[in-house]
Structure formats: C-alpha cells, structure tokens
Image: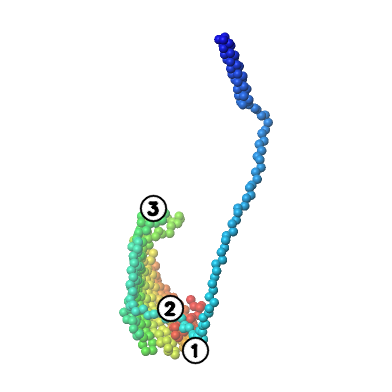
Amino acid sequence: MKTIYNIKALCVVALLGSAATVSAQEDKTKEKDLNREMTLEREYDPTVQDASKVNTLPVIKEPVVKKMPIDYATFTVPADPEKEISLLPSGNIMTDIQYNKRRGYFNFGGGTYLNLNGDVGYHILSTDKDKLNIWFSHRSTNGKVKYIDTDFDKVKAKLNDNLGGLNFKHAFEKLSLDMGIKYGYSAFNYYGLPVYSPESSVALVPENFDRETNQVNQAIQAKIGVESKEDAPVGYLLDLGYTNFSHKYALSKEQDGPTEHTFDVKFDLNARFGGEQRIGRGVDGSLERVALAVQQTAAAMSTAKPTGMLPCIRNFRKNLQAQNPGRS
C-alpha cells in the first residue's frame, strides 16, 4: 500500500512540473508578441476625420403680454373762457444806464517780481452845473530776470509808470466849459542785451552797456474847450489842446533826449434839421515842434498837420457824431 501512494505522489509531481513548463513557455511567447518592434520605411500621411457642426437652435419662449384694462372717464365739464384780447406790456430793455451814486474808486494789487498795480479816483464835485474829478494810476515792477542762452547773472528789470489827471466842467446857461490836465511819468532801464552781430567789434560783455541808468519819459497834456447846449438851434464846439513830451536821455547819458511840443485845435459848427438831427462842418489841425540834441547842438524841427474841413452829422438827442470815413 505504501508503494502505491508513493507512485501516485510521483505522478502528481511530474504532472505539476510539466504544467509549469508549458505555462512558462506560453508566457514567453506572449511577451515576445507584445514587445515586437516594427520599422516602416515609407512616408506617413495622417488623415483627420471630417467633423460636422452641430446646428441646434435654442428654443425661444414667447413672453406673455397681459393687456391691462383701461377705464376712461365718460363725463365732461363745460368751459366758457372770457372772449377778451389783452395787449402784453413791452419788455424792459434797459436802454438807460443807471447813475452810480459812488463818488470814488480804489484798487490795489501786487505780485511776483515786485509788481504793483494801483488806481484811485474821486468825484470832488458832481452836480448838474459843476463836475470836478481827480484820478491817478500806478504800474511798477522791480524784479530780477535771467538772460536766455547766456551765463550772465540776473539783472533788474525796472519799470515805474504813473499817470494822473484833473478834469473840470461847468455848465453855463447857453454853453459848457470843459478843462483838464494830465501828467505822465515813466521810468525804466535798458535791461536787455544789445543787438549783436559777428561783424561787430564790440564784445558781448555786460560791463560794456549800461543797465542801471533809468530812462525817463514825461508827458504833460492840457486842454480847454467850450460847447453849446444840445438843444441850441446852432451848435458849436471849440477845443484847444497842448501836449509836451520829453525824453531824458538820447543815445547816451551825455546827450539830452528829444522834446516834442504839439498844439491841437478843433472847431465844429452845426445846425439842427429834421427834429433830432444836425448837419454841419468840422475843422481840426495840429502844429508839432520837435527839439533834438545832436552832438551837444540843439536842432529844432516844426511840422504842421494840414487843416481839414469835414462834413459831419450829429444826433441831437444822443450827442453822436459821424464824420467822413476817409479821415486819418
């Protein structure tokens, strides 16, 4: 019995061994098939399958509109407006300038570069017969400026402008008398660089030109005139004026500047026609005398402005005057 069991055991072992050998051979065959390499020796032309767009329209939902009921009033109210046409009043055009009750004014301002501006005026008399006023204006600066494209130091730019006047007017029974005087004073320095050219022998050096001396201009103007009343049948106007202008220095401090004297005269004669219109003729002229200092020798030159007679039309109410447009 023991021998039979041993034979059976050997048979089982032999079968298991042969099965294991066959299984190992099959595994090697499969592995060889999976790891097989292929070499292609021709061009590869890949192709892409055509795709078609999916055309799908969304579903549109129609909104539900609910009609609201509207109730209208069926009753009426009788109306009986007044059958009357009324005229509208005219608008306020403001053609007349309102009289300013203030008798004077004053303003003052300052800024950089020591800029100062000031104005003052006052009506000393302001009645129907007499008017007297005085006024004065001032403009000045005293700041330092720098030259462009140069290495020079800053220099002061000085300016001092003053202008004042006095006016008087008196109304007589048949005419009015008008008088006035003005005085102007202007001082300044030549702080700018002179005109320089390459051919000039003068070197462009700040010490070669005067920037400190103040040049002074002065002007005095006086006038006197008479004028008839606006409602006079024959109107007339006579104005006499004198102006004196002087320059302190000429091209240098060693030479006196020029002086100018001007005399002006104006005469107008007119008569009324057509109610509020006037027609007449006007005459005006001037005489000028200029005194120049050339090499310490005074030279005088006088010129006379031609006197012209020009027609004029004057409005009686507004006191406007229209003259020949060709007048210079």
Q: Nearer the viewer, residue 254 or 92?
A: 92
Q: Which residue is mark 3?
A: 151
Mark 1 vs mark 2: which is more N-terminal? 1
Give the percent coordinates (x, y) of residue 64.
57, 61
Q: Nearer the viewer, mark 3 or mark 2?
A: 3
**Rendered residue at 38%/57% (across/down):** 146
Q: Nearer the viewer, mark 3 or mark 1?
A: 1
Colour basis: rainbow
The part of the image, by quadrant, that contains residue 17 is top right
Around disc 3, counting alpha carbons within 10 Å, would you say few (fewer than 14), some (14 to 19), or many (20 or more)? few
Left or right: where 70 falls relative to 239: right
**Rendered residue at 45%/55% (across/down):** 198
Q: Which residue is mark 1?
A: 274
Q: Nearer the viewer, mark 1 or mark 2?
A: 1
**Rendered residue at 44%/83% (across/down):** 318
Mark 3 vs mark 2: which is more N-terminal? 3
What's under tag 1, amino acid-wise?
A: Gly
Q: Residue furthest front?
A: 1
Does the CB distance between marks 3 and 1 fall below 8 Å?
no
Give the percent coordinates (x, y) of residue 207.
36, 56
Around disc 1, counting alpha carbons within 10 Å, would you say few (fewer than 14), some (14 to 19), or many (20 or more)? few
Q: Which mark is residue 286?
A: 2
Give the percent coordinates (x, y) of residue 171.
36, 86
Mark 1 → mark 2, Cα distance in angstroms: 34 Å
What's under tag 3, amino acid-wise?
A: Asp
